[in-house]
Structures are given as structure tokens and as C-alpha cells.
Image: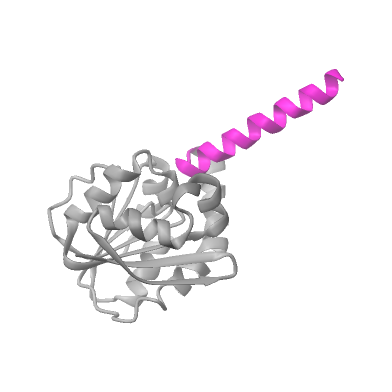
């Protein structure tokens, strides 16, 4: 019985530790997790861009970049764009800066308060991250502020994460209603392999 309780405590500790690392990676474990994310979630990011058919963006903000792989993917799709990637993790931004290229900058910032200029981005992307934001309402208010008029917000994530973290707005209709409160219109959505992506336009 004592052994069972001990094992259960260890498993519980590991679960919450890895959850914390998912939100804000640190140290060797965080760097390792970011490499795993690249293999798992970059295909999702690439797929989500097929929903964004306009393919025109001069200034892009990528939120929750990890080690910057998703931001560099955006640079492939929009080679002439100026792109900023932000993350709350110092370790993530340090790793991202190691792979930075011309036209891409990375900063340690919170999505709830980016310190970026008002109406300065054509496209904002968020891959496998919005369910981790501390204050979802405040985050979408901030995204609305930094997006240009008629700008696009592109979100993609695992559907299972929505049902776990954001069950009240996991269904598309509920999410569309929620986003309308903050000035966004859901224009398109797609599902594939357990993923979901939303294309929203600033009204």
C-alpha cells in the first residue's frame, strides 16, 4: 500500500511538472520538450496555413513560439514579411534566438501585455498555446489591439486540449460567439487528425 501511494505521488508530481513545462519550458527538460513539440506540432502549423489562402502578410506576430520553429515556418510561407515571435519563457526565447534569421525577431513577452504597437500586424498566429494563457479575455483584447483593421488571427491546436482546458468554448459555435465579444468574426474552420484550426478576422 505504501509503495502504491509513493508511485501515485511520483506520477502526480511528474504530471504537474510536465504540465508546467508545457506552459513555460525551462532547463534541459524544457529544451527537450520543445524539440518534441517541433516533431508533433509543426505538421499541424503547416496544415493550418492551408486554411489561410490569402497568403499576404507584411507583418506577423507568432505567439507562444517555443524554440522558434513555428516562426521560421511562417518565414518560409511569407519570405518578405517582418515577423515577431513572443513567449513567456526565457529558455524558449534563448533557444529561438539561436536560430533567428533576417526579418525575424524574438522577445520574452506575455500575450496579455505584449508592449507592441497598436494596429501593427496583418496576421497573428497561435499554435498549441491559447489554452495555456493566464487570462484568455485579456489576451484576445490585446490581440485585437495589435491587429490591423481587417487583420487575421489564425489559431490551431489539438481538439483534446480544448475539451480539457477550455470545455466551455470547445465547440465551434460557442467559440465563435465568444470571439465575437472581442471583435473577431470566425470566417473559417477546419479539422484534421485530431487538430482544429480557426481563421478569425478583426471586425
Q: In the drawing, does residue 181 fall left or right of residue 22?
A: left
Q: From the top left corner, tell me how far across and down residue 62 is, in percent.
A: 32, 59
Q: From the top left corner, tell me how far across and down residue 125 is, in percent.
A: 34, 62
Q: Which residues are magenta?
A: 1-26
Q: Is residue 35 magenta?
A: no
Res 81 seen here: yes
User: Residue 58 appears in which quarter of the rendering?
Assistant: bottom left
Which residue is found at the position 52% from the left and 60% from the top? 38
Q: Is residue 18 magenta?
A: yes
Furthest toward the top, the residue is 2
User: Residue 68 appears in which quarter of the rendering?
Assistant: bottom left
- 51 shown above or below 165: below
- 155 shown above or below 27: below
Count of numbered circles on the image = 0
Q: In the drawing, does residue 166 fall left or right of residue 180?
A: right
Q: From the top left corner, tell me how far across and down residue 47 is, in percent.
A: 47, 74
Relative depth, front residue between 201 and 130: 201
Which residue is found at the position 51% from the left and 47% from the top? 31
- 4 shown above or below 179: above
Name the image quarter holding the C terminus.
Answer: bottom left
Which residue is found at the position 29% from the left and 80% from the top? 55
Res 108 seen here: no
Furthest toward the right, the residue is 1
Name the image quarter holding the N terminus.
Answer: top right
Q: In the drawing, does residue 20 fall left or right of residue 123?
A: right
Please name the predominant secondary structure of the magenta segment in the image.
helix
Which residue is found at the position 40% from the left and 69% from the top? 73
Amino acid at each position: 500500500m505504501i509503495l502504491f501511494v509513493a508511485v501515485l505521488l511520483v506520477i502526480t508530481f511528474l504530471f504537474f511538472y510536465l504540465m508546467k513545462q508545457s506552459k513555460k519550458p525551462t532547463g534541459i527538460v524544457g529544451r527537450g520538450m520543445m524539440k518534441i513539440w517541433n516533431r508533433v506540432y509543426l505538421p499541424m502549423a503547416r496544415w493550418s496555413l492551408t486554411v489561410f489562402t490569402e497568403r499576404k502578410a507584411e507583418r506577423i506576430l507568432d505567439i507562444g513560439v517555443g524554440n522558434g520553429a513555428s516562426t521560421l515556418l511562417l518565414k518560409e510561407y511569407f519570405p518578405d514579411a517582418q515577423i515577431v515571435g513572443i513567449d513567456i519563457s526565457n529558455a524558449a526565447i534563448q533557444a529561438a534566438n539561436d536560430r533567428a534569421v533576417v526579418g525575424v525577431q524574438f522577445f520574452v513577452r506575455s500575450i496579455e501585455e505584449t508592449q507592441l504597437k497598436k494596429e501593427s500586424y496583418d496576421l497573428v498566429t497561435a499554435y498549441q498555446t491559447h489554452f495555456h494563457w493566464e487570462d484568455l479575455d485579456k489576451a484576445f483584447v490585446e490581440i485585437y489591439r495589435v491587429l490591423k483593421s481587417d487583420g487575421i488571427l489564425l489559431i490551431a491546436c489539438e481538439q483534446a486540449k480544448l475539451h480539457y482546458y477550455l470545455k466551455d468554448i470547445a465547440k465551434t459555435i460557442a467559440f465563435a460567439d465568444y470571439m465575437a465579444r472581442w471583435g473577431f468574426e470566425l470566417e473559417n474552420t477546419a479539422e484534421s487528425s485530431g487538430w482544429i484550426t480557426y481563421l478569425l478576422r478583426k471586425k
